Amino acid sequence: MCIHQLNLLAASNSLPITNFLGKQHPIEAHHLSSICDIMEKAMVNGDTCIIRCILVVFQVVFKFFFSPQTERNRDIVRRSGLLLWQLLMAPRDQICSEIQKEVCLAISSGLNILYPGEAEINNLLKLVLTEGERNSGLSQLRDVILTNLAEQLQNNRFGSEDDDHYRLNDELLHYILKIVVRESCVLITKCQTVSKDDFQRLLSTVPAASSCLRYLMAVQNHLLSNTILIKPDENDDSDSSLQGETLKVQELKTSILSLATQILTGCDEVLEMLQQVTTALINSDISDREQRLKGLEQITKATMLGHLLPVLLTSLMHPNLQTLTMADALMPQLVQLVLYTSQTALLLKTQSPVFSELNSSPSGASEQKGKLLPDERMLEEKEEPGFLTGLKIPAPWAAGKTVETVHPVRDNYKFKETVHIPGARCLYLRFDNRCSSQYDYDKLVIYAGPNTNSRKVAEYGGNTLGYGSRSVLGTGWPKDLVKVEGDTVTFSFEMRSGREHNTPDKAMWGFACTVRAQESSEDVSGGLPFLVDLALGLSVLACSMLRILYNGPEITKDEETCQELLRSKLLQRCQWQVEANGVISPALTPSPSPLPLTIDEDREFTYPSDVLVPPVGHYFDLPRIRLPPGIMIKLREISGRARPQFRPSIK
């Protein structure tokens, strides 16, 4: 199978053989016809070895050496396609799995040749997506095509020429999403239905994403990454370029909104199934109930809840996607997902040993109620704080921050770094037991503050290995925790001496120190349970979207420009009318209203509601508004009219 190895090597774009094969002349039609003749004869004789070889030849020919430009070539292509489909749809007892796999690879390699039009490819994909569950050959072909499309999509930028080819239309995406939802529900259901041994084998195979799930992951990552990372062309600042980038961003956001809506809808269905399975396991009498409940979280991570939802939630928090349109469309689904995840996390937590200890009575009655109906358990939920009870929330500084020099330090080496942990009352430093420097004046100085002007806490230097100064500063490098008051500490190290020829690396190792905001070094960085983490993430996103809905549309540039006019009491007291199209404009005809003849500018005044729409046929004078002297002076300056002067008459 040397040609098979050649095909695998040619699949890599980084190898020279790929460029070599790509520059070869296309194969002639009669050569491909001869290949088809050999295939037909091998199929009649049942020669599996020759069939496999010809299938690999098809893969190479379709990928590099054939271009169906003439009618004769198209006839040969149709003949090749019929032969491949005969092998693909053959009964399982007449074709081995290896040949079926090679057939799928050949069709996938020649997808654009066997199906030159977009409509033909869409019809093929619709066939394999809808009938794949009933036929193993179509199912395998679906997996191969979607895997190849996912790999190609990850290497293409949004809006490129090949983007539309690799990113399928909404109808096909809907079919793929239905398959992914069904696969996720089946996987979760197995936690309840399979035997004990099969459940252990199931745990050892996850999280393995199916081809449909991998393609959805590729589409989601493709859209989200381009939305977050898209940048305009710096070399082209023309209006057409800016307009093109704006249209591209809008198209991206529209695609993301459509995909996010479908994914959240699918996750809603999967979470509903998860809640049902969790309740059924809690109420069951199987011997390994606790093991299955523990493994349920691992199984859940292998579904679309683990592969799609966390990435989507994180990306939707990006400012580019925090829009009013997105919030208005996704808010109902987010609320429903928050309810499902929090309720299911609560159900799982009630079965954990930690929760049992927290709820055990003083008299020793620690037995939990064995079987509860879902409604009864939801009522019991009100009796305790919630699904976060008893859980240790990981802090960003739980694992500590490590500060260290290069190892070993070199001549004239200087090091300075500041660690700040917001909210910490004090910091605890733990030094590595290998800390050392050549002389005691090659030292580390620690300051309790943001710079070297802060209060000095301690200084360490030297070594006890018998090199350099053969001594250390004070009591030497600390073996216990060093406490620094405050939330900030600064490290300053300087290598002042030159390295001597007999000084080994271990005597010039430098230092390494871990800074924590807590005295104990217990491991609290393991993270939250998956469903709890998912519920918190959904809650944060829902609150963010709710804030956007509360704030409403952003202030436009025109509104910012007219802020002074909008705040003007003079304009606020003008009479306005509502036109037929809903636009409010100044009333051309004065309306009757019980207004005083003079309105002071310095006094607050509110118009009655009946003066918004003026009646027809009545004419009244507008009330006189007394303006402050400062405004009157400015108006006279602008108009050029001086204040009238009254001269006394001379008799």
Image (cartoon, rainbow, N blue to C red):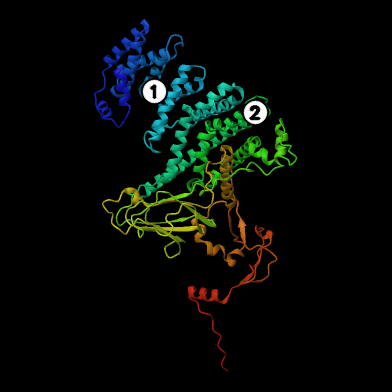
Percent across and percent down for residue 106 are: 37, 20
> Can I make out residue 119 in this image?
no
The type of residue carrying mark 1 is Ser
**In front: 633, or 359?**
359
Residue at point 48%, 58% (across, down): 488
Percent across and percent down for residue 223 are: 45, 38
Q: Which residue is mark 2?
A: 281
> Can I make out residue 78 in this image?
yes
Residue at point 35%, 55% (across, down): 470
Q: Identify whether 198 is placed above or below 647.
A: above
Disc sitting over residue 259 in the figure: none
Quadrant that contains the N terminus: top left
**In front: 326, or 454?**
454
The residue lying furthest to the bottom in this view is 651
Percent across and percent down for residue 602 are: 62, 72
Q: Quadrant of residue 384?
A: top right
Q: Earlier in the sequence, mark 2 or mark 1?
A: 1
Q: Which residue is mark 1?
A: 108
Q: Identify whether 106 is placed above or below 455.
A: above
The type of residue carrying mark 2 is Leu
Q: CA distance from mark 2 to mark 1?
A: 43 Å
Q: Secondary structure at mark 2?
A: helix
Percent across and percent down for residue 173 are: 49, 30
Q: Is residue 452 left or right of residue 38?
A: right
Q: Quadrant of residue 606?
A: bottom right
Q: Residues within 10 Å of mark 2 (few under 14, many from 20)?
A: many
